[in-house]
C-alpha cells in the first residue's frame, strides 16, 4: 500500500491533482478540508468548532485534526493506496501521521511538494472564489491562509526532507504536465 502526502499552499492544485491520482491509481482520498466542510454542513459539534477557525483563515487545532484522522484511518484496510490532502499541515501533525501509520504497520511513501508562487496562488484562489461557495475564498481570508501556510505549514517540508521522502513538483504549467511529474514520483516510491 502506498501512502502519498500531497502538499502545497492553498490554491496549489492539490485537490485537482488528487482527483487525477484517484482516477489513475484508485487510491482512497483523505482531504481534511473536505471532511471538515462536511462536518460543518452536517452542523456537528466538531463542525461548529472548526468553522470559527476556518473562517478566520486559521488552522483547526492539531488535537482535533489528529483525533479525526485516527478515526478516519480505521476505514482504510484494503486500499491500494491513500492520498493525504491538506494533512499534515503542521510539524506536530507530520509526527502524528507517522505514529498513526506506524501503529498500522506502514509509513508515508512519498510527499509531493507542489510549488507555486504567491501571486499565482492569490489569482487562482480569487478565481475559485467566484464559483466555489467556500466561505474562506475571499481576499482577506486568502491572505491570512497564506500567512498561516508560510508560518505553520512550511516546516512540514523539513520533516519529510529529513525522512527522505520529499519530492519537489513544479506546480505551474498544464494540469497534464504536472500530473506526469506526480505520476513519476508515485511510481518511484516504495
Ligand atoms: P483546505 O480545503 O485543505 O484548504 O482546508 C480549508 C481549511 O480547513 C483550512 O484553511 C484550515 O482552516 C482547515 N484545515 C484543513 N485541514 C487542516 C489541517 N490538517 N489542520 C488544521 N486545519 C485544517
Image (cartoon, rainbow, N blue to C red):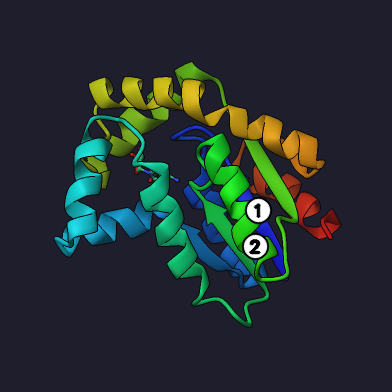
60 relative to 149, above or below: below
Q: Quadrant of ligand 1?
A: top left
**Residue reaching furthest to the bottom:** 78
Query: Nearest the camera: 47 or 5?
Result: 47
Residue positioned 78% across, 42% down in the render: 163
Whether residue 87 appears in this view of the structure is: yes
Residue positioned 51% across, 48% down in the render: 87
Locate residue 33, reporting x and y percent.
Answer: 37, 50
Residue 167: name its quadrant: top right
Whether residue 175 appears in this view of the structure is: no
- Along the horizontal axis of the image, is 190 left or right of 157? right
- Along the horizontal axis of the image, is 172 left or right of 49? right
User: Which residue is labeled 2 in the image?
Assistant: 101
26 relative to 39, above or below: below
Identify the element where label 2 is drawn: helix
Tell me, for residue 82, which label it has, or none: none
Identify the element where label 1 is drawn: helix
Q: Dot 1: few (<14), some (14–19), or many (≥20) neighbours within 10 Å?
A: some
C-alpha separation, residue under disc 1 versus residue under disc 2: 5 Å
Locate residue 182, reporting x and y percent.
Answer: 71, 49
Residue positioned 45% across, 68% down in the render: 72
31 relative to 104, above or below: above
Q: Quadrant of the C terminus?
A: bottom right
- Look at the numbered discs 1 and 2 and tell me whether their residues touch, using CB distance below 8 Å: yes
Query: Nearest the camera: 102 or 3?
Result: 102
Locate residue 71, reporting x and y percent.
Answer: 44, 68
Tell me, for residue 98, which label it has, or none: 1
Mark 1, ligand 1, within 8 Å: the answer is no
Residue positioned 18% across, 58% down in the render: 45
Query: Nearest the camera: 56 or 90?
Result: 90
Locate residue 156, reporting x and y percent.
Answer: 61, 34
Query: Nearest the camera: 55 or 13?
Result: 55
Amino acid at each position: 500500500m502506498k501512502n502519498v502526502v500531497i502538499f502545497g499552499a492553498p490554491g496549489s492544485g492539490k485537490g485537482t491533482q488528487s482527483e487525477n491520482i484517484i482516477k489513475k491509481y484508485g487510491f482512497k482520498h483523505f482531504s481534511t478540508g473536505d471532511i471538515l466542510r462536511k462536518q460543518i454542513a452536517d452542523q456537528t459539534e466538531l463542525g461548529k468548532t472548526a468553522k470559527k477557525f476556518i473562517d478566520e483563515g486559521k488552522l483547526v487545532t492539531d488535537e482535533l485534526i489528529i483525533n479525526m484522522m485516527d478515526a478516519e484511518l480505521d476505514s482504510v484496510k484494503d486500499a491500494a493506496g491513500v492520498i493525504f490532502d491538506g494533512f499534515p499541515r503542521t510539524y506536530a501533525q507530520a509526527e502524528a501521521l507517522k505514529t498513526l501509520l506506524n501503529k498500522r504497520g506502514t509509513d508515508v511513501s512519498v510527499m509531493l511538494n507542489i510549488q507555486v508562487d504567491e501571486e499565482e496562488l492569490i489569482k487562482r484562489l480569487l478565481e475559485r472564489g467566484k464559483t466555489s461557495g467556500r466561505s474562506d475564498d475571499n481576499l482577506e481570508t486568502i491572505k491570512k491562509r497564506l500567512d498561516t501556510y508560510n508560518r505553520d505549514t512550511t516546516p512540514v517540508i523539513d520533516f519529510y526532507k529529513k525522512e527522505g521522502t520529499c519530492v519537489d513538483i513544479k506546480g505551474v504549467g498544464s494540469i497534464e504536465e504536472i500530473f506526469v511529474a506526480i505520476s513519476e514520483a508515485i511510481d518511484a516510491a516504495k
